[in-house]
Each structure stands twice: as structure tokens, then as C-alpha cells.
Image (cartoon, helix red, strand yellow):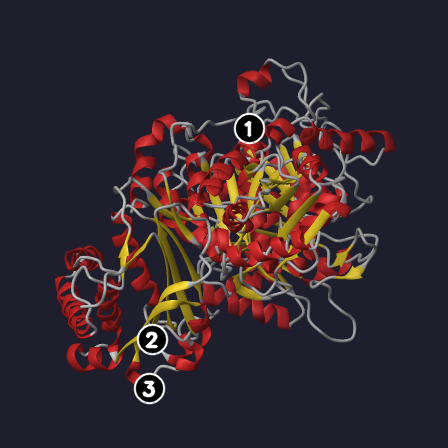
């Protein structure tokens, strides 16, 4: 038996191979097992834009503490082929373990750190020979993996039974594979509960494991969302897929339509009746929706629109994250119109801000955009079950028949102090009115009179100006007294949090701000830049769209330092930590 | 009585075919005794895209080419409404053509009136897909197109110059939608006296199949054959061209007037047990 194994409270593992190899299955199985042991999870996928094949990787971070991003280095790499080692080997920590499927040749050692320990087993070959199916290599490798991590066999068995529970034949075949994994573990001097590490555990908590897309779709549903129209596009399709079987249970409708133009305009049609509606897309689809977006702003129709940003420009890299739509979301479309852009940074934000967006759009009769990025949209994280008791429904200035009847006169676009006009949707007796994206008078009749025009533009702008208090505030952490700030949104938030802690450990305490309202830029965001000597603006695009947005709102550009990444992968904590240390060293 | 907007005077040129369309629509709504608040007229962009301002119902001015998408969303969200989409041939057959094909396929319970004048009038006379071009080419026939889509349930073609006939077609179309049989496509040959005065040409070319005892609107193959033949002779088939029993999209989606999304109580307290079950599915 090997010497006593080291303790580990923050595990980073990557399973990779060709798409269809089942890397995700292994991560899902392990995630369940570790969640049952009270650990927090963060998982991410890295796939090619094709149905099967191409390099595919699934990553899992599990630990006592809750983390909002992947770690810097891998403790374990499960590689179903040599390419997986070539691509991910360099991420392995010095003493890391590689579980390698040697079916098609030896492990390419030159891509691994010197101290790496390689457990080479021809999983695929044995799975085919003994179980007649290549796919059983998942459970096979899972058996070896759980042993390496020092986990009890019975927990691995329970995990498989839970996963394949309905199909006894599948359970039995997978258990055979699992046991083959255990057997090989013995050969690698890895008896039960004596792995390469002793993984920390905690009391099992009641937690959910959820992606940003799922959390957001759920938030839309519980805040009364009943209509969704969409067109498939990575990485936003999950939202439609999640809602499709669920919304109808509540009397709602999900429609997959012919294009993004139909999606937004169908949602507009539903929204005009007073039904809470949403559509979702990604960069190219959002570009197609721009005309509808300006129209919503002009015609004063409430709608929630989700943009799961992926790497652009154009079709760009569909499965990779970026924050390259910020400028389009804040400034796209024609003319001046009110809009709100919210930026969630994790599943909790996604849920909370979806509810907020639904209510705000109704209250202000305007569009609210939820700006996610592929990482926030599709990475999964554990969190506490969402608070359902706190959900409130804001109906805004909706009029029913009685309220209309009590009025002497009804004007759909009535000038009001807060810019929001009373709203009688089609079907309301006595409230007949005209809705248009053309400039119009208070009755909704087309008008180009200069005086009316100016008043209408001002009225629409007032809706946001008078509602700033309702917009979601930023999250803050770190040392509020520090002269150095970090500022980032979306997928930058989790990385920023971790980097800040490490910086504090090195005597370089920083204050962090994660604005959750991107547009309008709130005073708190501008003040944050003003109040610090230097603010590192962390963003995932090349041109600094976030920094420019802040500068445009009055944040002093000269105080900003720019940390930008646009290679299709998010920052990692160590990268950010070093970049800030370097920056501070240069001060 | 709460005072509301006063319907606008039409913006159309004297003699415009659209006057006939508006008159037929008004009369059909009176004939069917529909309450004004239960009618939503959604119109596209162009001269035709102002009809919603003139009648006194709920009105919506859509984006160019998108009137069918908005109308479909509205018909599903509130099937109590009589949803009438209207627009021109440029709006419907050029920029909006994709949605027309998919509306035939989906069969939402609404009426779509295309005022076909074979030109872009508002932008001063450019050719449209329905223009009969000099020197070759063929105008697009949306009725024949609709006949090629399996989901189609109602196709009719009228003429502004035949007011009584048009009113009858209008009533049939509105009834088709109201009875939740689906998408009622009514094209009205509605000449633009300023840029494409086709009154004489169309009066001569139109062939009213409603007067033809051999015409059977439920026989799709026969209708396709007849319409294709007439077109080959330079004639324009008119009348109730095709009518089939159908089930509106909203019915297929299990949305009815009684349980329409617009009438549902969305207070979370009422549904919290069901919401908790969804949360339960996320537990790990």
C-alpha cells in the first residue's frame, strides 16, 4: 500500500475524449456522488460545435467551499484518447493523476508534468471484449476514478444504480464495468478507501445543481411567464428545451418558430395581450432581433429577452463564451428608447434577475434584456434551493374593464409624471386603442408634430429615469477600504471573487464590484471607479466594450486598467491574480 | 362611456382599392355582430398598413413583414380575440414571405387580408413580387403557394371592384377564424390608382369561381389544377378557392378561451406546490 494519502478539499477533474465518448456521464456520476458527500460543485463543458465527435471535455470542481469558476490546475485527468492528454495535460498539477485509456496506444508523456502518475488501462478494448460495448468504458473508468479518489465502492455502486435504475439490464452491465474498474484499481495499489487523496467531506446539504439557463427559465416561469417563442441557437437553446415540457403544465405555450424575427414578433404579439412573454437567443439571433427590440422600446410593449453571449463576431465560435454583445445590447437598434440590460453572474443571479426582469418589464412597459454569457448560461453549480416564498408579481399600470369605465377618457400613451401610461390590453371592454412603433400622439395615432415628438421621447426616457431604484444593485466583496478595485460582470464574477481572496492573502487586498445592471449604468458603478485609485475592468472581449460603457456614463477612463480575454475561454483565478499582481507591481 | 380615440380618415388616394377592403371588413364585422373590444386589427407597413386606425377596434401597427408573427402570438395568448392581420403584397410576399408559408403550415386561428396592388405604393411605385412585369417573369400567386402547403385550410381571393362578393368572402374568412378552424387567407386584388392602375386589366382577367358549378373548394387537386390552368391563360382565379375542415393552432396547443394564458392567475402562492416540484427535480 502507498504512503498515507494527502488531504484534498478542492478537487479539479477533467474528463475528455471524443464527443460521444461519455465524458459528461462520468462527470455527472461523480458530481452526484460528491454532492451526496456535502461538497459544492461547479461543472463546465467544452465541446465542439457538432453532434458527435470532436474533442469534448467535461470539467468538475468539487470542494467544501462554494466556487464560481473552475480552478487553475487539474488534480485528475481522465483521458479517453491521446488528444485529450495533448490538449489538457499541461493543466495537470505536479502530482496529478492521469487515468488513460490505452486502447489505441501509449500515453503521450511529453504533454504531462514530470511528477504526474499515469494509470493506463485499455478501457475501450476491455469494454468491447468483455461487455460488447465501447460505451461501458465510462462506468469502467468511473470505478477506477472513485478508487483513486478514495471513495467507498458502495457509493459508486449506488450512484450507478440511481442513474440507470429503471433498466435492470443496463444497471447490471454497468456494474460489471464498474467492478472491472475496481479490479484494476487493486492492480494500481489502490484498495477501497485508500486512494491517492483523502477527499474532504461535509454534512450533506439540501442543494440544487443548476445551470444559469435553467435557473433563468425557472425564474421566468415562477414569476408568471406563460409564453415563449424561440429559434434554436447555441448556447440559448437550453432555455427553450427546459421550458418546452414544463410551461404547458401551467397553461403556458412554448413555440419553436421559423426564425428569430418570428420569435421576437410572436412574443410581441403575445405580450400585447398582457401575457408575460420571453424570447432567447445568442449574438447572431440577437442581431436579427434588433428591429423588434427598438420596436418594443417605441411601442412600449413589455418583453424579456435573453442573450446568451457566445464568441463573435458573426457566427464566431458558437460553443465558446464571450462578452462581445455588450455594446449591441446597450446601444443597438434604431433611435432613442428606454431599455434595461441586466447581467447575472451565476445561477442565483439568473433566477433572481429573471423574476426582476419579468416584473420590471410589466411595470415599465419596456424590454428587459438578460445578458448572460455561455459560461453563466451553461455551467452548472450547486446552490441553496431558490426562495419561492419571496416571489412577487408586479402588474404595473394594467387596467381592467371597471377601471377603464371609471375613466372619462382613455389614452394608451398618456403623458404621465413617471412616463408609464395606463395600459388596457386588447380584449378589455371600452379600452380600444392603437399601438404602434411609429411616433404617435397620446391616442396612438401617427404624429410627426415636433412638440408631440419631443414630449414622447422624453416620456419614454422618463420611465427608466424614474425607476433607477428598482434596478438590481451590484454585488460587492473584498476590502471596501482598498484603493484598488476589480470590476467585472457575468462569468468574470466567480473568478474575480477567488482572485481577490488570493490577492488578499498576498497582502494586496482589493475591492470587487459585480454590476448586475449593465444598462443604464448605475451611479454606484461610476462611483466605484471614481472612488478607487485604479480599477481593473475584467471583460471577455477584445475592444473593451464594458470599459467604454462605463466611461460613456462618466467613469474616469484614466483610472481603469484593462484585463481582457477573447480566446474563447474564461479567465482562471491564477491568471487574474497574476495579472493584477503584475499591474500593482508596476505601480 | 369612456372617450377613446376617434378613428382616422383613410390616408389613401381617391379611388384606391383599399377603400373597398375597409368597407367590406366593416360590414362583415357588423354582420357577424362582433364587439369592437374583441377585435384586434394588426397591420403591416405600407398604404394598407393604416387600416387598423380607421375602424375603432384595437389596432396594432407591426414591423414591416412581421404582422403574421405578431398576430399568431396574440391569437394564442388570447383566443377570445378575433385577430385580423392585414397588409400589402410587398409586406406579405417580399419581406414577410417566410412567415406566410409558416402560417399556412401552422394554421393559427386568424384572418390574413392581403391587399394586393402589385406595387409598393407608399415608396412610390417600385415593383413587388406580385407585379406583372413587362418583359418576362411571372407575378407570384400566393393562393397557389398556399395550396402547396399541406396545413392550409382556407384560401380566398376577392376584388375591390366586387364589393358584395368581397363582403361575403370577408364573412367566410372571419367565420373560419372565429370557429377556430384556422388560418383564413384572403387576398384582395386592390388596385393602386396612382402607381399601378390595374382596374381595367384585373376586371377583365378575374374569374369568379364561386359562380362556377364545377368548382369544388374542398377538392384541393381540382383547385390547383383549375387555378394553374387559369393562370396559364392569363386569368386570375377568384372566389372561395379552397376551404377545408381544420383545427386552429391554439386548439392544438390546448389553448381555449376558457384557459387562455391571458386569463390565468399567475399569483405564485396559488402554484407554489407545483413550483416546489420543479425545484425538487434540480436537487442533487
Please tell me the numbered disc located at residue A105.
3
Indicate the chain on which mark 1 is placed.
Answer: B
Which quadrant: the N terminus of chain B? top right
Q: In which quarter of the image is residue B171?
A: top right
Q: Residue B51: x and y, percent?
A: 69, 40
Give the mark nearest the N terminus, 2 or 3.
Answer: 2
Q: Residues within 10 Å of mark 2 (few under 14, many from 20)?
A: many
Please tell me the numbered disc located at residue A246.
none
Looking at the image, residue A284 lies above or below residue A527: below
Q: Residue A133: x and y, percent?
A: 22, 77
Q: How far apart are marks 1 and 2 (CA)?
A: 68 Å
Q: In which quarter of the image is residue A370?
A: top right
Indicate the chain on which mark 3 is placed.
Answer: A
Helix, strand or loop for disc 1: loop
| Residue at the image position 30 percent from the left and 44 percent from the top | B283
> A264 left or right of A108?
right
Of discs 3 and 1, which sits in the foreground?
Answer: 3
Q: How far apart are marks 3 and 1 (CA)?
A: 78 Å
Please tell me the numbered disc located at residue B35.
1
Could you say which is closer to the camera, residue B184 or residue B191? B184
> B93 left or right of A574?
right
Could you say which is closer to the camera, residue A398 or residue B38? A398
Looking at the image, residue B2 lies above or below residue A328: above
Q: Residue B251: x and y, percent?
A: 40, 44
| Residue at the image position 36 percent from the left and 78 percent from the top | A81
Q: How far apart are marks 2 and 3 (CA)?
A: 11 Å
> Do the numbered discs 2 and 3 sit on residues whose CB atoms are within 8 Å?
no
Q: Mark 2 points at which residue?
A: A80
Total tally of numbered discs in the picture: 3
Amino acid at each position: 500500500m502507498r504512503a498515507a494519502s494527502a488531504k484534498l478539499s478542492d478537487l479539479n477533474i477533467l474528463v475528455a475524449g471524443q464527443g460521444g465518448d461519455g465524458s459528461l456521464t462520468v462527470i455527472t456520476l461523480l458530481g452526484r456522488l460528491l454532492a451526496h458527500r456535502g461538497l459544492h460543485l461547479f461543472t463546465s463543458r467544452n465541446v465542439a460545435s457538432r453532434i458527435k465527435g470532436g474533442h469534448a471535455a467535461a470539467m468538475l470542481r468539487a470542494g467544501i467551499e462554494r466556487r464560481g469558476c473552475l480552478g487553475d490546475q487539474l488534480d485528475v485527468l481522465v483521458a479517453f484518447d491521446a488528444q485529450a492528454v495533448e490538449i489538457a495535460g499541461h493543466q495537470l498539477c505536479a502530482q496529478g493523476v492521469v487515468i488513460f485509456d490505452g486502447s489505441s496506444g501509449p500515453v503521450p508523456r511529453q504533454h504531462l508534468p514530470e511528477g504526474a502518475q499515469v494509470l493506463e488501462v485499455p478501457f475501450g478494448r476491455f469494454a468491447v471484449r468483455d461487455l460488447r460495448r465501447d460505451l461501458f468504458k465510462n462506468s469502467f473508468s468511473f470505478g477506477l476514478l472513485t478508487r483513486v479518489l478514495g471513495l467507498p465502492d458502495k457509493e459508486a455502486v449506488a450512484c450507478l444504480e440511481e442513474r440507470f435504475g429503471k433498466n435492470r439490464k443496463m444497471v447490471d452491465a454497468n456494474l460489471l464495468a464498474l467492478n472491472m474498474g475496481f479490479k484494476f484499481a487493486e492492480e494500481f495499489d489502490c484498495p477501497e478507501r485508500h486512494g491517492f487523496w483523502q477527499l474532504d467531506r461535509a454534512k450533506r446539504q439540501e442543494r440544487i445543481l443548476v445551470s444559469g439557463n435553467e435557473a433563468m427559465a425557472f425564474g421566468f416561469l415562477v414569476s408568471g411567464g406563460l409564453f415563449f417563442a424561440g429559434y434554436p441557437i447555441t448556447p440559448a437553446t437550453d432555455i427553450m428545451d427546459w421550458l418546452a415540457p414544463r410551461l404547458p403544465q401551467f397553461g403556458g405555450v412554448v413555440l419553436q418558430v421559423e426564425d428569430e424575427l418570428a420569435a421576437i414578433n410572436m412574443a410581441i404579439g403575445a405580450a400585447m395581450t398582457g401575457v408575460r412573454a420571453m424570447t432567447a437567443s445568442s449574438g447572431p439571433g440577437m442581431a436579427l432581433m434588433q428591429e423588434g427590440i427598438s420596436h418594443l422600446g417605441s411601442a412600449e410593449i413589455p418583453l424579456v429577452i435573453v442573450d446568451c453571449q457566445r464568441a463573435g463576431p458573426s457566427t464566431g465560435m458558437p460553443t465558446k463564451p464571450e462578452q462581445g454583445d455588450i455594446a449591441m445590447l446597450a446601444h443597438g437598434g434604431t433611435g432613442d428608447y428606454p431599455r434595461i440590460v441586466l447581467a447575472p453572474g451565476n445561477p442565483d443571479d439568473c433566477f433572481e434577475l429573471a423574476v426582476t426582469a419579468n416584473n420590471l418589464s410589466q411595470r415599465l412597459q419596456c424590454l428587459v434584456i438578460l445578458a448572460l454569457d455561455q459560461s453563466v448560461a451553461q455551467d452548472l453549480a450547486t446552490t441553496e434551493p431558490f426562495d419561492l416564498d419571496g416571489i412577487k408579481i408586479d402588474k404595473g399600470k394594467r387596467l381592467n374593464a371597471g377601471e377603464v369605465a371609471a375613466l372619462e377618457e382613455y389614452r394608451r400613451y398618456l403623458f404621465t409624471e413617471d412616463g408609464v401610461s395606463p395600459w388596457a390590453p386588447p380584449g378589455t371592454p371600452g379600452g380600444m386603442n392603437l399601438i404602434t412603433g411609429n411616433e404617435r400622439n397620446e391616442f396612438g395615432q401617427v404624429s410627426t408634430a415636433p412638440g408631440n415628438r419631443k414630449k414622447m421621447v422624453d416620456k419614454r426616457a422618463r420611465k427608466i429615469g424614474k425607476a433607477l431604484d428598482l434596478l438590481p444593485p451590484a454585488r460587492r466583496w473584498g476590502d471596501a477600504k482598498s484603493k484598488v478595485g476589480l470590476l467585472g460582470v457575468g462569468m468574470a464574477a466567480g473568478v474575480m471573487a477567488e482572485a481577490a481572496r488570493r490577492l488578499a492573502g498576498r497582502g494586496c487586498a482589493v475591492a470587487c464590484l459585480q454590476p448586475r445592471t449593465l444598462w443604464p449604468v448605475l451611479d454606484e458603478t461610476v462611483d466605484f471607479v471614481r472612488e478607487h485609485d485604479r480599477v481593473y475592468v475584467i471583460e471577455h472581449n477584445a475592444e473593451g466594450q464594458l470599459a467604454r460603457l462605463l466611461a460613456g456614463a462618466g467613469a474616469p477612463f484614466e483610472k481603469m486598467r484593462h484585463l481582457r480575454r477573447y480566446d474563447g475561454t474564461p479567465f482562471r483565478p491564477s491568471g487574474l491574480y497574476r495579472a493584477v499582481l503584475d499591474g500593482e507591481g508596476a505601480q | 362611456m369612456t372617450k377613446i380615440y376617434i378613428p382616422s380618415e383613410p390616408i389613401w388616394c381617391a379611388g384606391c382599392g383599399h377603400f373597398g377592403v375597409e368597407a367590406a371588413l366593416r360590414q362583415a364585422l357588423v354582420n357577424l355582430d362582433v364587439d369592437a373590444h374583441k377585435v384586434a386589427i394588426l397591420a403591416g407597413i405600407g398604404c394598407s398598413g393604416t387600416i387598423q386606425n380607421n375602424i375603432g377596434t384595437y389596432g396594432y401597427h407591426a414591423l414591416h413583414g412581421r404582422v403574421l408573427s405578431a398576430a399568431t402570438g396574440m391569437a394564442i395568448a388570447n383566443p377570445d380575440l378575433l385577430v385580423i392581420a392585414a397588409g400589402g403584397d410587398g409586406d406579405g410576399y417580399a419581406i414577410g414571405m417566410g412567415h406566410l408559408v409558416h402560417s399556412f403550415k401552422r394554421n393559427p386561428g386568424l384572418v390574413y387580408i392581403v391587399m394586393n396592388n402589385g406595387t409598393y405604393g407608399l415608396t412610390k411605385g417600385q415593383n413587388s413580387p406580385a407585379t406583372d412585369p413587362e418583359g418576362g417573369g411571372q407575378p407570384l400567386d400566393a393562393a397557389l403557394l398556399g395550396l402547396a402547403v399541406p396545413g392550409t385550410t382556407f384560401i380566398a381571393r376577392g376584388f375591390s371592384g366586387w364589393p358584395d362578393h368581397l363582403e361575403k368572402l370577408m364573412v367566410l374568412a372571419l367565420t373560419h377564424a372565429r370557429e377556430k378552424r384556422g388560418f383564413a387567407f384572403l387576398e384582395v386584388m386592390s388596385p393602386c390608382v396612382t402607381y399601378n392602375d390595374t382596374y381595367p386589366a384585373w376586371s377583365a382577367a378575374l374569374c369568379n369561381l364561386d359562380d362556377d358549378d364545377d368548382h369544388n373548394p374542398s377538392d384541393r387537386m381540382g383547385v390547383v389544377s383549375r387555378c394553374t390552368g387559369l393562370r396559364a391563360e392569363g386569368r386570375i382565379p377568384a372566389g372561395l378557392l379552397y376551404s377545408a375542415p381544420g383545427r386552429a393552432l391554439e386548439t392544438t396547443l390546448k389553448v381555449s378561451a376558457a384557459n387562455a394564458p391571458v386569463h390565468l392567475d399567475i399569483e405564485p402562492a396559488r402554484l407554489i406546490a407545483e413550483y416546489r416540484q420543479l425545484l425538487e427535480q434540480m436537487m442533487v
